[in-house]
Amino acid sequence: MEEILAKILGTDGYRVARTALPLKLLAVRSGLGWYGRNNICYVPGMGSFHQLVACYSDLPCQGDDWREAQMMESCKNCHACIHHCPTGAITSDRFLLRAERCIVFHNERSGDIPFPAWIDPSWHNCPEGCLHCQRVCPQDRDFLQWIEGKEEFSQEETALLLEGVPADQLPGATVKKLERLDLIEDLDILPRNLSVFFKK
Ligand code: SF4
Ligand code: SF4
């Protein structure tokens, strides 16, 4: 993204650089999206199935849509994500997610931190992240078909990932698959995260 923007703006002499800011908050406050009750950012025409990137530039900005953070209108009469979140991370008495109850918080932590005992193994549904609240969200209904099975791992490859074999000792084809899935930087968490699927 940064390269594309640099090409477009660079022709007029402007500079652009990627920045690490709280992306959901930035998107919601700048008018690009809205928060869902599940604290995920929803963008019109994409639901919650997008990847946010932030860049800054010295291009003069004509418009200013900066606003208070807002929740989607459709959340006011909907509680689907509350009912389907297995951990109780989403509650109706407060807007902020109980992050310490969210599966994502636990399966993206350093791989040497075990899952707490209160997380039932059957609640896990992704090698990284969690899709329970997005799968049931009416605002995501039209975009669920975007979820695709991109890669398949053989039994041998899965065994290597469960063992935590480092990238430089994995077969090249396995590394390519992990790169396409954007998981190559997360090899340390895969042994813990994958092992739960074999304990169910
Ligand atoms: S499931 Fe309902 S309440 Fe939850 S984010 Fe989607 S629209 Fe909002
Ligand atoms: S990502 Fe999973 S655990 Fe977190 S709030 Fe959504 S359903 Fe609950």
Image: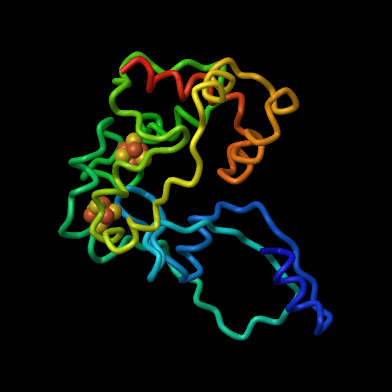
Up/down of 46 relative to 124, above or below: below
Which residue is rendered at x = 58% and y = 15% of the image? 163
> Residue 156 lies in what quarter of the image?
top right
Q: Is residue 104 left or right of residue 60?
A: left
Return the x and y of residue 176 as percentages of the image width and height: 65, 40
Q: Determine which quarter of the picture holds residue 175.
A: top right
Q: Where 7 falls versus 179 (above or below)?
A: below
Q: Nearer the viewer, residue 66 or 192?
A: 192
**Horizontal and vertical percent for residue 97?**
35, 41
| Rendered residue at 34%/61% (across/down) | 143
Q: Nearer the viewer, residue 119 or 186?
A: 186
63 and 103: which is toward the camera = 103
Looking at the rendered image, the quarter that the N terminus falls into is: bottom right
At 39% across and 61% down in the image, what residue appears? 42
Q: Quadrant of the C terminus?
A: top left
The image shows residue 190, relative to residue 40, as above or below, that is above
Q: Say whether residue 9 is left or right of residue 156.
A: right
Q: Is residue 13 left or right of residue 177?
A: right
**Residue 90 rendering spot, x and y as whole percentages:** 28, 41
Quadrant hosting ligand 2: top left
Query: Which residue is painted at 46% across and 24% down in the image?
Result: 194
How far across and down, in percent of the image, does residue 82 sit? 22, 43
Q: How many marks?
A: 0
Residue at the extreme right of the image, as rendered: 13
- Quick check: 37 left or right of 65? left
Residue occupying the far left of the picture: 77
